Every structure is written in C-alpha cells, then in structure tokens.
Image (cartoon, helix red, strand yellow):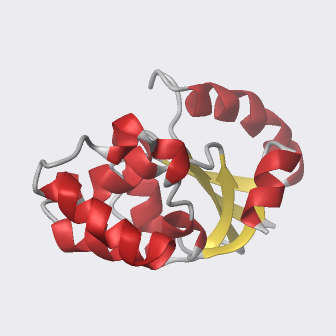
C-alpha cells in the first residue's frame, strides 16, 4: 500500500513532529510511505491513501488541513480543541466570514454572536479565553474519511 503522509517533522519544534519522527520508521516497515512536507506544491500521485496529522498550531498544521480539504483522508487528531488552528486559518487569513460561519455551524446562533464579538474586539479571543468551550473540531473532521485519536475521551467527544 502506498501512503501519502502529511505531518510536521523535525526540526520543527512540535510534539507532533517528534511523534511522527518516531512513527515513520515503523510505518515504512509495512507501507510505501511518501512524506509530504510543508511547502510541497502538490500531494504525491499514485498513492492509495493519505494520512494527515493535525494539531492546534496554525503555523504547523494549517497547510495540512488545506491539503486534507483538497484530498480527504484519514486524520490523526492530536488535539480535539483546534480553535487556535481555526482562528489562524480564518481570521489569520483575513476571512472573518469563515470564522463566523464555522462558529455558527458548530455552536449555533450563540457561536456566531460570540464570533462577532471577537471580530469586533468586544470580547477576548475565544481561542485564548475559552477554547475548551468551543473546540471547533468539525472544521477538520468534516473532511476526514477516517479518524485516529489518542484517548477514549476524545473518541467519546467525536461520537
């Protein structure tokens, strides 16, 4: 089986990069793995599946979610709360409407009203003040064809 593998890797200073560095040798014993790095122009062709490692840091993981949206695949969700990632991928890209829509889709009218408050600077950014109340995991998971998590707690939250 040929696998496209999307993840931050050392020398990036993230726990996910360290995790991937440990996991890759074991995967390569059983699979034909093509590692896709940040800055790659396109995903490798001719692969049977794609595995995306997603955490909450927009600098380390936004490019991976962008790739996931182009080609759905299996997600290893390292953080259930990805509000900071979502903020980076919407507000950080001058897409306030994307943030509003995501908050409304995942948390209803209250979510949209709170998002307006954040954008208007009437309330503190929710990814800093209350991220656990607004995890925004479906922003990532809506594109997943499969999911790997690290705990039964997250497994229960996803269901």
Task: Give left or right: position of 49 versus 92.
Answer: right
Res 43 seen here: no
Q: Is residue 32 above or below residue 95?
A: above
Assign the N terminus to one quadrant of the image: bottom right
> Which of the 4 quarters of the picture holds residue 15?
top right
**Residue 141 drawn at (x, y percent):** 60, 68
> Which of the 4 quarters of the picture holds residue 79?
top right
Front residue of 154/17: it is 154
Q: Is residue 100 above or below residue 131?
A: below
**Residue 151 drawn at (x, y percent):** 83, 43
Res 154 seen here: yes
Assign the C terminus to one quadrant of the image: bottom right
Task: Give left or right: position of 18 versus 23.
Answer: left
For image coordinates 28% across by 71% down, the residue present is 100
**Residue 38 drawn at (x, y percent):** 39, 46
Tally of numbered discs: 0
Front residue of 158/123: it is 123
> Which of the 4 quarters of the picture holds residue 90?
bottom left
Task: Give left or right: position of 117 versus 83.
Answer: left
Front residue of 144/12: it is 144
**Residue 67 drawn at (x, y percent):** 44, 66
For image coordinates 56% across by 68% down, the residue present is 138
For image coordinates 82% across by 56% down, the residue present is 155
Task: Give left or right: position of 12 versus 98.
Answer: right
Q: Is residue 156 above or below residue 39?
A: below
For image coordinates 83% across by 58% down, the residue present is 156
């Amino acid at each position: 089986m040929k696998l496209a593998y999307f993840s931050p890797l050392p020398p990036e200073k993230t726990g996910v990069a360290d995790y991937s560095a440990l996991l890759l040798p074991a995967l390569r014993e059983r699979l034909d793995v093509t590692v896709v790095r940040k800055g790659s122009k396109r995903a490798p062709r001719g692969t049977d599946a794609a595995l995306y490692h997603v955490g909450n840091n927009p600098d380390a993981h936004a490019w991976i979610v962008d790739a996931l949206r182009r080609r759905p695949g299996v997600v290893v969700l390292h953080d259930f709360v990805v509000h900071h990632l979502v903020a980076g991928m919407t507000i950080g890209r001058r897409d306030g409407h994307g943030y509003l829509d995501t908050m409304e889709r995942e948390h209803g009218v209250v979510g949209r009203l709170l998002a307006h408050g954040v954008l208007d600077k009437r309330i503190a950014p929710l990814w800093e003040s209350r991220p656990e109340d607004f995890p925004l995991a479906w922003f990532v998971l809506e594109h997943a064809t499969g999911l790997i998590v690290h705990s039964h707690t997250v497994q229960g939250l996803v269901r």
